[in-house]
Image: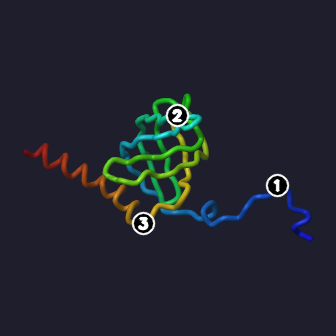
Amino acid sequence: MSMLRATHLAKVQSEMYERRWERFYVKRPARIVAVNRGLSGITMRHCEIVDISQGGAGIHVSTTIGLPEHYYLQVPGISERIGCAEVYRNGSRVGVRFIMALPENMLHRIVRADFMIGEKMERAQRR
């Protein structure tokens, strides 16, 4: 009987959207890679990852004009592209959820790279 009361607007329960992950604050350059309409090519734009977790990220972009709701996030030093679905836009800040949760080792590579880049810059300044 409960199935009869359900509508197409009913929320689908999913662990992906209910689970909360630990968020890490990083300032990491990245690229947004979007597939053009009709699969006619790709568009790339620079962005900065402000914070990231296994389930999503906060991104800063120079402009949201022409930015689709689904795209890939490409992080330098990480070979895989991360599929994203936009959750909100607030000025130049965009919140995304990842299509698939990031594996822990990939998240750690992204977060640790921020520390490694900082260490390399400090060593170069000492010389």
Q: Residues within 10 Å of mark 1 (few under 14, many from 20)?
A: few
Q: Amino acid at mark 3?
A: Glu
Identify the residue under disc 3: 104
Instruction: Please tell me whether residue 52 is drawn above or below residue 93 in the rendered image.
Output: below
The answer for how far apart the CA atoms under marks 3 and 1 are is 34 Å
Q: Earlier in the sequence, mark 3 or mark 1?
A: 1
Residue kind at label 2, given as amino acid type: Ser
The quadrant holding residue 31 is top left
Toward the viewer: 11 or 24?
11
Name the residue nearer the viewer: 39 or 119.
Answer: 39
Residue shown at the point (39%, 61%) measured from the top left? 106
The x, y position of residue 98, in whole percent, is 53, 54
Could you tell me residue 109's position as x and y percent? 34, 59
Residue linked to disc 2: 40
Q: Nearer the viewer, mark 1 or mark 2?
A: 2
Q: Residue at x 52, y 54 (%)?
A: 56
- What kind of residue is marked 1? His
Indicate whether 124 appears above or below 108.
Answer: above
Nearer mark to the viewer, of 3 and 2: 2
**Mark 2: few, some, or many residues within 10 Å (few <14, many ≥20)?**
few
Q: Residue at x 43, y 34 (%)?
A: 45
